[in-house]
Image (cartoon, grey):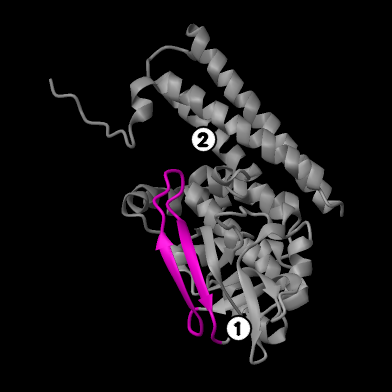
């Protein structure tokens, strides 16, 4: 079954109920991994599928077309998997990476902070050595679906007893061993955002220098920028998915009035503008994916895609709202039979 058919048949019918209840169907994720989600960004040598960035971008675009929260969750699981695939030792891979790739464990990605955003160089969450292990404490913000995860990667700044800064590293935090608090944040675009307060003092497992190096690699940073949600300022694939949905919505709305689209010049102009924004955004994002697949860093290309796609999806949403009129402000439209 093609991935779009699976999403339309198995996922789309569940979206409305989960959005209302602010829940997430975790049991569906392992089925999606067989299409290349999450495992696609991990090398075959460590249990992944090793898919090109172009294929991963298309997969994430399809997920976003179906449900923004699904795409975001798959993206974060993929980011965790890529860091573990690059940085985990044999024991960490056995305990965290393999269960993650099999859909038996789920991980959060603890980078973004209230005062630092996603700038790893400005992190304020710190870690100090204690009895041969690193323990950290601090706050993270906009951590996707941490309420449903049983472990995570906490990015911290390592400071020794003398106050010397040793740079940023990643701590593997297992809920069974370390305490961390997760609080839901009501978020309009995505029903999956949380605040995380970490007080990691017992048995944290550090990825050490290899996690630092993995975080610096394009596949861990700019690859995430390719797929992270536009509400976070990123998200090439998410933005294009949103644009594609706008095209479908405006076409449906325009047909509902019972006249050809060509009969309404203003509607036609809106549809053409949204379609143009969609195609140019998609091509710009594909160019970034091809650049990474060619072995180049892709920072310039990913930054252009990040900027343009984010701006485009905002413009498309405004046009779609205007076309729908008052119905564009409704959370859900229920069609009822008109009684004679």
Is residue 90 or residue 43 the one in the foreground? Answer: 90
**Can residue 325 be spotted in the picture?**
yes
Name the residue at the front extreme.
Answer: 162
Given residues 221 and 111, the one toward you in this image is: 111
Q: Is residue 106 magenta?
A: no
Residue 210 in percent (x, y) is at 77, 74
Q: Nearer the viewer, residue 231 or 137?
A: 137
**Placement of 26 over or under 199, stated as above or below:** above
Q: In this view, does 25 lie above or below 271?
A: below
Q: Residue at x 44, y 19 (%)?
A: 323
Residue 170: horizontal and vertical position, in percent? 67, 72
- Residue beneath disc 1: 95
Q: How crowded is mark 1: few (under 14 residues within 10 Å), some or many (20 or more)?
A: few
Image: magenta residue range: 175-202
Disc 2 residue crowd, few under 14, some 14–19, many 20+, Cα 10 Å = many
How many numbered circles are shown?
2
Residue at the image point whose x is 50% and y is 53% from the top: 70
Labels 2 and 1: the sequence-earlier one? 1
For label 1, the SS is helix
Q: Residue at x 52, y 58 (%)?
A: 141
Q: Position of residue 192 (x, y in %)?
A: 45, 55
| Res. 334 image quadrant | top left
Q: Where is residue 229 in the image (x, y as percent from the top left)?
A: 57, 47
| Residues marked 2 and 1 touching at CB (< 8 Å) | no
Q: What element carries label 2?
A: helix
| Marks 2/1: CA–CA distance | 39 Å
Say whether residue 197 is magenta. yes
Q: Which mark is residue 283?
A: none
Q: Mark 2 points at which residue?
A: 245
Residue situated in front as seen by the camera: 270 or 300: 300
Please tell me whether residue 161 is drawn above or below residue 44 in the rendered image: below
| Residue 86 visible to an observer of this rendering | no
């Amino acid at each position: 079954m093609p991935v779009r058919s699976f999403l339309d048949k198995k996922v789309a019918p569940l979206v409305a109920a989960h959005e209302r209840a602010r829940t997430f169907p975790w049991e569906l994720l392992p089925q999606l991994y067989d299409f290349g989600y999450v495992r696609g960004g991990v090398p075959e040598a460590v249990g992944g599928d090793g898919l090109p960035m172009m294929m991963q971008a298309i997969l994430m675009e399809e997920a976003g077309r179906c449900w923004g929260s699904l795409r975001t969750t798959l993206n974060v699981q993929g980011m965790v998997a890529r860091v573990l695939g690059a940085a985990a030792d044999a024991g960490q891979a056995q305990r965290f990476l393999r269960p993650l790739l099999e859909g038996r464990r789920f991980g959060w990605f603890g980078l973004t902070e209230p005062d630092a955003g996603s700038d790893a160089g400005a992190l304020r969450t710190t870690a100090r050595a204690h009895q041969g292990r690193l323990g950290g404490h601090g706050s993270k913000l906009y951590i996707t679906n941490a309420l449903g995860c049983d472990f995570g990667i906490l990015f911290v700044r390592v400071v020794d007893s003398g106050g010397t800064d040793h740079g940023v590293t990643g701590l593997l935090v297992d809920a069974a061993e370390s305490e961390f608090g997760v609080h839901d944040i009501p978020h309009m675009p995505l029903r999956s955002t949380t605040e995380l307060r970490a007080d990691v003092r017992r048995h944290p497992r550090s990825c050490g220098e290899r996690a630092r190096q993995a975080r610096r690699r394009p596949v861990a940073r700019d690859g995430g920028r390719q797929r992270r949600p536009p509400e976070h300022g990123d998200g090439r694939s998410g933005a294009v998915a949103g644009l594609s949905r706008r095209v479908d919505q405006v076409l449906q709305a325009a047909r509902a009035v019972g006249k050809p689209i060509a009969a309404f010049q203003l509607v036609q102009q809106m549809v053409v503008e949204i379609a143009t924004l969609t195609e140019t955004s998609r091509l710009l994002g594909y160019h970034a994916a091809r650049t990474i697949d060619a072995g180049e860093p892709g920072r310039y290309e990913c930054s252009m895609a990040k900027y343009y796609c984010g701006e485009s999806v905002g413009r498309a949403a405004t046009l779609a709202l205007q076309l729908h009129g008052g119905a564009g402000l409704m959370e859900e439209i229920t069609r009822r039979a008109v009684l004679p």
